[in-house]
Amino acid sequence: MSATATTPLHEQYSLRAPREYGNYIDGEWVKSSSGQTFENRNPANSDDLIGTFQESNSDDTAQAVDAAQRAFEGWRLTPAPKRGELIYRAAEILKRDKEKIAREMTREMGKVLDETKGDVQEAIDLAYLMAGEGRRLHGVTTPSELPNKFNMCVRMPLGVAGLITPWNFPIAIPAWKSMPALVAGNTIVIKPASLTPLSVVMLAEALAEAGLPKGVFNVVTGGGREVGEPLIKNPHTKVISFTGSTEVGRDISIACAPTFKRLHLEMGGKNVIMVMDDADVDLAVDGALWGAFGTAGQRCTAASRLVVHKKVYQQFVDKLVGRTKKLKVGFGLDRVDMGPNISAGQVETVKKYVKIGRDEGATCVAGGNELRDDAYAKGHFHEPTVFADVKPDMRIAQEEIFGPVTAVIPCEDLEDAIRIGNGVRYGLSSSIYTRDVNKAFVAMRDMYTGIFYVNAPTIGAETHLPFGGTKETGNGHREAGVAGIDVFTEWKSCYIDYSGSLQRAQIDTEEI
């Protein structure tokens, strides 16, 4: 890490000077009624204070929901094309400030600059996509079974949307949720992850500059118990969208059930790359490295399982280990391949699973250690780690680790690979490396995941296709693409009878 003792990190890298940030409520930046703040520090260097943020409480949450509720009537009656134009302006602002936002995000979240640029680009792409939907938002028209009658269905916004977002994609995922909610006519209260609040503050700044009316988009920072729970339970929030762990998602589902509140959950993953004996092994290793160690493995789509045909297993492992050992770890604004884990707690989780893997009898063939020497002493770093000789039922092959650890599992054939791939409680992303189109289509048909790739890793979803998974990964909804609008709208079927007489559907019949 190139930081020196004499020059603050933000000055070295032309970043924001640390300051206190407020909540964004009803178009104003305000302090919490609690009078408390919390610090946000760089996970690569704890000496680097990014800023202090509001330690908000239920009163702040209620104030934000009230502002969103007041703004809803005017926003829902704003023509959808006009809503889309405001979102388009926000996309242009994000595009203009992409480099600046990405650098701040690397400092806040840790992943390397190329990845944070991609994070901002996802927000830009989603904003452009949803800006266009402002001129579509289409339903369907159908012929009526009765004469002189017209049938159609239209979308209605739900009201106030409560968004709870994670730290690993701190501007992309808030945009995935916010842009479809906004273009559909909903207003928003968002609780960003406490580890990455600045990224959502920067999104709010872009939306404010774009001219979004006050109260339409509100940000409240703080803990899950103090902000998240009141947001979920507030009777004026009509839809909750959450990305995070399956365990927390289950609790949110229970909390929403008594009032039948609309709920979207995007949760865990234990994703698999299947490498067949006819695969381009070098290409598969490229994909495994990117899939396993991009964002230091802190992605719900991370390739934490590599199921490899026995005929190419040793070749694949040898090449993967050689490449893994060459990866450079450090501060993401320097020339490195992988950044830190987000927190000391996340490093402890990784260390726990490395020990579990060893205790279960898997062979640690690369990495396996926390990085604590002088270059890493002030950050949360762990080596990229590869386990070989892993059995499908081992915990490191079944449980989500959310760190730079991947498990290589041998398989007999395609059928065995698919069986192993499907043999977990999650169903987010899967991929296959093969030169045989028939194998690719069989795997695409039989893998029970919401996302599937051929000759590509398990990460890299594009914003115009639905994103989400099966089983304990989600609750059936999707975000991104046009499908993301479904979370934030209700269908209304409309029947217009211009016959001038009473007609009774399913009862009146007419001879032809």
Image (cartoon, grey):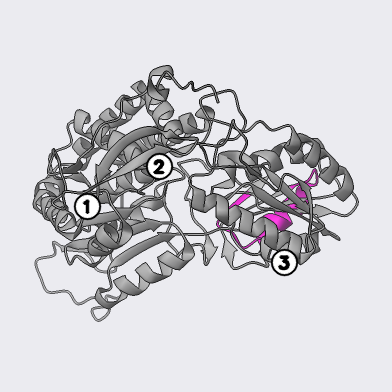
Residue 336 to residue 355: above or below: above
Magenta residue check for 434? yes
| Cβ–Cβ under 8 Å for marks 3 and 1 | no
Residue 394 is tagged as 3
SS category of the residue bearing label 2: loop
Q: Residue at x 28, y 39 (%)?
A: 52
Disc nearer the start of the sequence (3/1): 1
* Residue neighbourhood size for the residue with mark 1, other residues' Cα within 10 Å, grouped as few (<14), some (14–19), many (≥20): many
Q: Earlier in the sequence, mark 3 or mark 2?
A: 2
- Mark sitting on residue 56: 1
Residue numbers of the magenta segment:
433-452
Three-letter amino acid code at the position of disc 1: Ser
Q: Are marks 3 and 2 in contact (CB under 8 Å)?
A: no
Is the residue marked by circle 2 packed among few (<14), some (14-19), or many (20+) residues within 10 Å? many
What residue is rendered at 72% in x and 69% in y? 393
Q: CA distance from mark 3 to mark 1?
A: 41 Å
First along the sequence among labels 1 and 2: 1
Residue 171 vs residue 37: left or right?
Answer: right
Amino acid marked by disc 3: Met
Q: Is residue 280 visible?
A: no
| Kind of residue at disc 2 | Pro
Mark 3: give few (<14), some (14-19) or many (20+) Cα within 10 Å.
some
* Mark whose residue sits in front, 3 or 1: 1
Which label number is shown at residue 170? 2
